[in-house]
Image (cartoon, rainbow, N blue to C red):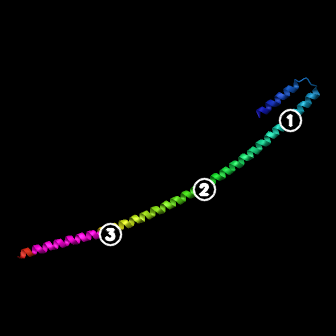
């Protein structure tokens, strides 16, 4: 914009100090003013087109970002759900393993207690038998 102002002022000063008649000078001024208006109008039109292009590009980019974020959020939800299901399955599996281990330990302890009880009875019977003799 400053360039256009400078060009207009420079052109006007050049015409004012040129060795021409007043009528020729005014005609040159009008012609250059019209050319400057046309150039300014062309620049304004180009700026408007660029602005519209940038606005459209920004809108498209915004829409793409929204879609990407939405897809990412959906993917994360699915991954979290899958991980949650895996954790639940692992917890169930561990629970079953603990139950089986506990049952095995119970059986082992019951057998050990029964064996110990039998040994105590046998020792008592032997002791009673020795006392009778």
Dot 2 falls on a residue whose secondary structure is: helix
- Quadrant in the rendering for residue 78: bottom right
Instruction: Give the mark, 3 or 1, whose residue is nearer the N terminus.
Output: 1
Q: Is most of the magenta stretch helix, strand or loop?
A: helix
- Res 70 label: 2
- Locate the N terminus and report the quarter of the image it occupies: top right
User: Label 3: few (<14), some or many (≥20) within 10 Å?
Assistant: few
From mark 3 to mark 2, how far is it between C-alphas?
Answer: 49 Å
In which image quadrant can residue 13 be found?
top right
What distance separates the C-alpha of mark 3 from that of mark 1? Answer: 101 Å
Q: Residue furthest left?
A: 133
Q: Is residue 99 shown above or below 33? A: below
Report, in whole angstroms, how far the alpha carbon at label 1 lies from the one at label 2.
Answer: 52 Å
Q: Secondary structure at mark 3?
A: helix
Query: Which residues lie in the magenta part?
Result: 106-128
Numbered label attached to residue 35: 1
Which residue, given by chain and number where applicable, does mark 3 sit on? Answer: 103
Q: Residue at x 86, y 34 (%)?
A: 33
What is the x, y in percent for residue 25? 91, 28
What SS does tag 1 mark? helix
Question: Callout 1: 10 Å neighbours few (<14), some, many (20+)?
Answer: few
Per the image, is 90 magenta? no
């Amino acid at each position: 914009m400053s360039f256009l102002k400078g060009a207009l002022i420079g052109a006007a000063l050049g015409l004012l100090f040129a060795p021409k008649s007043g009528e020729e000078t005014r005609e040159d001024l009008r012609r250059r003013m019209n050319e400057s208006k046309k150039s300014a109008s062309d620049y304004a039109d180009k700026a408007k087109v660029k602005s519209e292009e940038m606005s459209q590009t920004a809108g498209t980019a915004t829409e793409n970002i929204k879609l990407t974020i939405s897809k990412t959020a959906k993917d994360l939800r699915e991954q979290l759900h899958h991980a949650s299901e895996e954790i639940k399955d692992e917890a169930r599996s561990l629970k079953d393993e603990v139950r089986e281990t506990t049952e095995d330990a119970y059986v082992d302890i019951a057998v050990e207690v029964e064996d110990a009880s039998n040994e105590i009875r046998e020792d008592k019977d032997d002791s009673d038998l020795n006392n009778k003799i």
